[in-house]
Image (tube, rainbow, N blue to C red):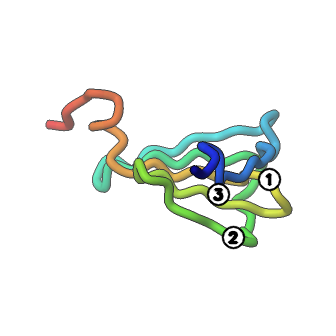
Amino acid sequence: MGSRNEGRHEYLLGDIEHVWFEYDQQNDILYINFGLDIEDADESFLTENDVAVRIKNNRVVSLTVFNFSRKIGYEIQ
């Protein structure tokens, strides 16, 4: 029987002193960026709950949350 954490990785957060958010209402996407600027990523992946995670040097540099309003229980009119 496999470990519950099998295939999981742990990453550090990027620059948490400079976190910024941007919401795209038309496409219902929340962007969360760690750092003063958008950094190029070494790798990225999509979680099972539709969050894109961008990684550079084992640090999360940004998260992209798709279908954000539905995740927080808010319906866009």
Give the residue displayed 39% in from the left and 51% down from the top.
66
Local secondary structure at mark 3: loop
Give the residue displayed 59% in from the left and 45% down from the top.
32
**Which residue type does callout 1 highlight?**
Arg
| Snapshot quadrant of residue 41 | bottom right
Local secondary structure at mark 2: strand
Q: Residue 5 in the image: x percent, y percent?
A: 65, 45
Give the residue displayed 19% in from the left and 33% down from the top.
75
Give the residue displayed 57% in from the left and 41% down from the top.
21
Mark 3 or mark 1: whose residue is earlier in sequence: 3
Question: Foreground residue, 42 or 9?
Answer: 9
Q: Which residue is mark 1?
A: 59
CA gap, disc 3 to disc 1? 17 Å
Q: Is residue 54 above or below residue 68?
A: below
Tell me: 1 left or right of 11: left
Mark 2 or mark 1: whose residue is earlier in sequence: 2
- For the residues labelled 3 and 1, say whether their Cβ atoms are less than 8 Å apart: no
**Quarter of the image where the C terminus is located:** top left
Q: Nearer the viewer, mark 3 or mark 1?
A: 3
**Which residue type does callout 3 highlight?**
Gly
Local secondary structure at mark 1: strand
Disc assigned to residue 7: 3
CA gap, disc 2 to disc 1? 10 Å
Q: Which residue is mark 2?
A: 43
